[in-house]
Image (cartoon, helix red, strand yellow):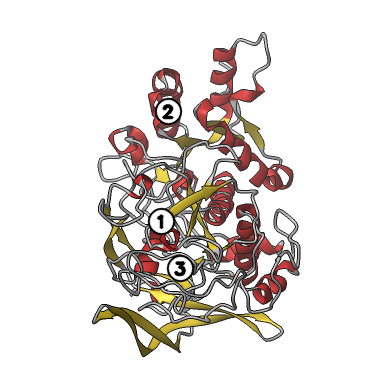
Amino acid sequence: MSSPPERDQLFISYSHVDRGWVERLQTMIRPLVRSLGLRLWDDSQIQPGDKWREEIETALAAAKVALLLVSSDFLASEFVTNSELPQLLTAAEEEGLRILWVPLRPSLVRVTLINAYQALLDPSRPLARMDPVEQEEALVEIALAIQEALAPRQDSPPAAAKTQGDSAGRPRQAAAPRSGSSVLPGADRQAVAAARSGAAQPEMAQPEASEPSAAPLPLQRFSTTTCLLRQEGGRWRTERRPLSVEGYQEQLGEGVALSMVKIPAGTFLMGSPEKEPDRFADEGPQHEVTLGAFFLGQTPITQALWRAVAGWQQVERDLKPDPSHFKGANRPVEQVGWFDAIEFCRRLSQSTGKRYGLPSEAQWEFACRAGSTTPFHFGETITPELANYDGNFTYGDGPKGTYREETTAVASFPANAWGLHDLHGNVWEWCEDHWHGSYDFAPGDDQPWLIPAAGAEEHRLLRGGSWFIFPGRCRSACRIHGGPGDASYGVGFRVVCLPQGPSLNP
């Protein structure tokens, strides 16, 4: 009787709808293919005229690690359910095959046998719900977990290659990462950092190893001024007061620092009520959203900040050092598209080790409102004394005023109650989300609302209004959209820093 074939390759099982994720993963693990002599198999290797079922069964028999890319389409596949999975699960129980799975999109995986095996992401935060920076980090960590599964530690007993089980012999799922964590079971934070830098990787932790905590950020107090609009005797009066908020500064070199303000966790009603003046239908229906704590840029990214980061090492695309139409180191950078903003965030993340990105639309509106329920964070109307927009026009019974016809230096106007400036007017700000024409079926959390398998040119969200826009378009709930490559002298962005450790998870 002939011996079974040597198990020496990675088998990727997926739905063809999710082919794009396979290609991204293959790009990420190409260094493993070279360094380990890894044999990689997915069904794109089946040539025309081949007997596809026999090819798949041969590949399954040679697999040492099976990576399942799980989505609703994957679980709906008759071939996956009836042919691939039974053979994989049998090999896992009897022959030492390692099964790892990645939640790509929300699905009913918890009611299947797959749920018993090691998930490489928290199933409540699948890949499609992450921002692009997080996705790249997750793909690195998935690759490291694959490396660990393919090359177990020398001092581990042979049984260590199998999934550990409970007292009944059933496989056990690895503990999900702590909320807000980017560290996955089977991957070590130091190894991820080494992979990014190109340094030699340290010995990796076992899947059950506890997550190392991020060092607390050195928080400080920022002093600013906030303001409310109140009506007295038929006239609007501004009521200003000093404000102290907590945050930190990211030093970017040459005296340039990015100020980040701590935004508390909370729940709010997102969108506008039906009777709000100048309301658009895409601002509803109003829905409750619950968010965790995060840090948000105190102002839009300035031209000085942009110029500093544009000189750093490129991640995916080149950045013009001085793209803005209106020049000024402390003015917001403009004429930058969504792709440009994402590149800026990736460079920040790569350089600092923190998780920078664009805010989700929910994070942006929650932070803008700062506990308010009025059309603007300072009250029922708006005045050119408090924001930069086309002052030739009014909102409600608010006053007319100056139309400046250009951007203004950031923080020229009072902050909202949480210490954030320029949320109404000056420049529109990119958000992470894809555009949806209403909030029907919108998620109730702080994650960006993305369209699965969307094309690269799918439109993205913009918030906040700009220097040349009508005042009604500067409301907290107002939303527009644009192509991710579009750039205008009325469009900029601010950045979010996502939870990474105890200091961001009070």
Say whether disc 3 or disc 1 marks the residue closer to the N-terminus: 3
Residue 488 rendering spot, x and y as whole percentages: 64, 57
Q: Residue at x 74, y 65 (%)?
A: 313
Circle 3 packing at 10 Å, graded few (<14), some (14-19), many (20+), is many
Say whether disc 2 or disc 3 marks the residue closer to the N-terminus: 2
Identify the residue position indicated by label 3 in the image: 424
Identify the residue position indicated by label 2 in the image: 73
Kind of element beneath mark 1:
loop
Q: Nearer the viewer, residue 449 or 423?
A: 423
Look at discs 2 and 1 and give the one toward the viewer.
1
* Quadrant of the image occupied by residue 207: bottom left
Residue 482 rendering spot, x and y as whole percentages: 56, 48
Say whether residue 144 is visible.
Answer: yes
Circle 2 packing at 10 Å, graded few (<14), some (14-19), many (20+), is some
Look at discs 2 and 3 and give the one toward the viewer.
3
Q: Residue at x 56, y 16 (%)?
A: 1
Say whether residue 202 is visible.
Answer: no
Q: Are marks 3 and 1 in contact (CB under 8 Å)?
A: no
Say which amino acid is labelled 2: Asp
Residue 196 rendering spot, x and y as whole percentages: 66, 61
Q: Nearer the viewer, residue 495 or 128?
A: 495
